[in-house]
Image (cartoon, rainbow, N blue to C red):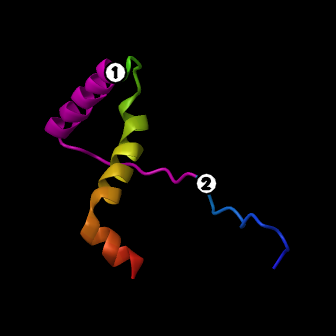
Amino acid sequence: MPDIKLAQLRDRTPVKLGISVMPDLNQALNDYAAFYAQAYGREEPVVDLIPAMLTAFLESDRAFSKTRAK
């Protein structure tokens, strides 16, 4: 192992996923993007918000976090 303080960085290559959603979920995502723009004064496309939304959801699920830590 090299004598360096910083550990080797993990793979950060994005993985592209394709999903289909129902029309009502699509509308909710578009509504959320509008709400986000109103809150922060900056528009972001839904496709850029979804990864952050999924991350926040997974990080807030305590049962999942406990299971994943095992």
Occupied quadrant, residue 41: top left
Q: Amino acid at mark 2?
A: Thr
Determine the secondary structure under disc 2.
loop
Please tell me whether mark 1 or mark 2 is closer to you in this view: 1
Residue 21 to residue 46: above or below: below
Give coordinates of residue 8: x percent, y percent: 72, 66
Q: Residue furthest front?
A: 5
Who's the residue at 41% across and 46% down the image?
51
Q: Tell me if residue 38 is in the magenta stretch.
A: yes
Q: Nearer the viewer, residue 17 or 9?
A: 9
In which quadrant of the rendered image does the C terminus lie? bottom left
Instruction: Determine the main secondary structure of the stretch shown in magenta.
Output: helix
Instruction: Using the image, tell me which numbered label, if any, was put on residue 37.
Output: 1
Q: Amino acid at mark 1?
A: Ala
Give coordinates of residue 62: x percent, y percent: 27, 66
Q: Tell me if residue 68 is in the magenta stretch.
A: no
Q: Nearer the viewer, residue 3 or 42?
A: 3
Give coordinates of residue 47: x percent, y percent: 40, 36
Q: Which contiguous range is marked in magenta?
A: 14-39
Q: Residue furthest right?
A: 3
Left-right relation of 69 to 27: right
Instruction: Using the image, tell me which numbered label, if any, was put on residue 66.
Output: none
Assess disc 1: are there few (<14), some (14-19) or many (≥20) residues with their C-alpha within 10 Å of its C-alpha.
some
Q: Nearer the viewer, residue 50 or 4?
A: 4
Q: Residue furthest left?
A: 24
Who's the residue at 40% across and 44% down the image?
52
Determine the secondary structure under disc 1.
helix
Instruction: Using the image, tell me which numbered label, if any, was put on residue 13.
Output: 2
Return the disc, 1 or 2, that comes first in the chain's sequence.
2
Q: CA distance from mark 1 to mark 2?
A: 28 Å
